[in-house]
Amino acid sequence: MTAPASPSWKTAGGLFVTFEGIEGCGKSTHLRRLAAVLRTAGYDVVEAREPGGTALGQALRDLLLTPSSPPPAPLAELLMYCADRAQHVAHVILPALAEGRIVLCDRFSDSTIAYQGYARGLDLELVRTLDARARGGLEPSLTILLDCPVTDGIARARHRTGQADRFEQETIAFHQAVRDGFQALAAGAPARYRVIDSSRPADEVSRDVEAAVHSVLAAETGPR
């Protein structure tokens, strides 16, 4: 990705890009790769994640991902994710966007809908309503869905960490429901989503990610 031709290409209004997908699909890897490319091109980039993007969020992340007995009830889990998001949006994402920065976020609202709605089986309307309140109407400019077979993603995730977190310990059927949920969300919002096959070599995936973001930068922050 080449640097902007003039200051008018800078993100004066900020740009919000989210990365979504099942466990082990490559979100963190490709977010970091993209951030490095954008910084080299002269952009001011914030790398964010959910849960855990704030001090409060990190405490919630520990509770949400650490295996426990009994685990949080599905509604309690949903409310914890919404609390994390409300804090993260207010104290990290919105201030960065107001400063004209590019925010790359590892998971956002769509993960909540896919995991707590489609996979946990909570009422989708309830999940959407609580999430909308937590994010205060904020919408990503672009959502990159890194898609791969469930068995591949789980194998990657478990190999990466060595010890499975609470979600990585879920059944294959659960993770398939998550993947199905993401695919349904992408089908319902084709203008916002770019679905990228992340089962391919990492360099190929990164090129597609960069191309997707470049197209949005050109559309949203190009010469006016």
Image (cartoon, helix red, strand yellow):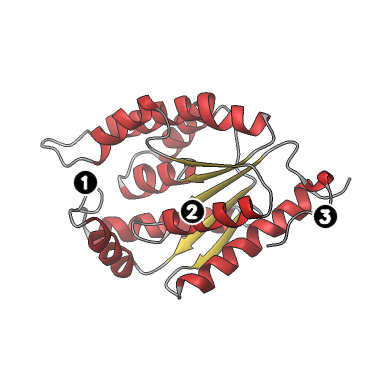
**Residue at image coords 32%, 65%:** 150
Which three-letter amino acid code belongs to the residue tagged 2?
Arg
| Secondary structure under the numbered disc 2 in the rendered image | helix
Tag 1 residue: 166
Q: Which mark is residue 143?
A: none
Instruction: Estimate the spatial distance between the alpha carbons at disc 2 and disc 1, rounded to whole Å.
Output: 24 Å
Q: Residues within 10 Å of mark 1 (few under 14, many from 20)?
A: some
- Distance of label 2 from label 3 (alpha carbons): 24 Å
| Amino acid type indicated by mark 3 | Ala
Q: What is the distance, in whole Å, between disc 3 and disc 1 at their CAs? A: 46 Å
- Sequence order check, earlier mark of 3 and 1: 3
- Which quadrant: the C terminus? top right
- Asked whether 115 or 32 is in front, the reply is 32
Q: Is 166 rendered above or below residue 171?
A: above
Q: Residue furthest left?
A: 69
Nearer to us in this view, 35 or 73: 35
| Residue 137 seen | no
Cβ atoms under marks 2 and 1 closer than 8 Å: no
Question: Residue 73 location in percent, x, y?
Answer: 22, 33
Where does label 2 land, which residue? 32
Residue 213's image quarter? bottom right
The residue at which mark 3 appears reads as 5
Which one is in front in this view, the residue at disc 2 or the one at disc 1? 2
The quarter of the displayed image where residue 27 is located = bottom left
Q: Is residue 174 left or right of residue 112?
A: left
Residue shown at 17%/53% (left/top)?
163
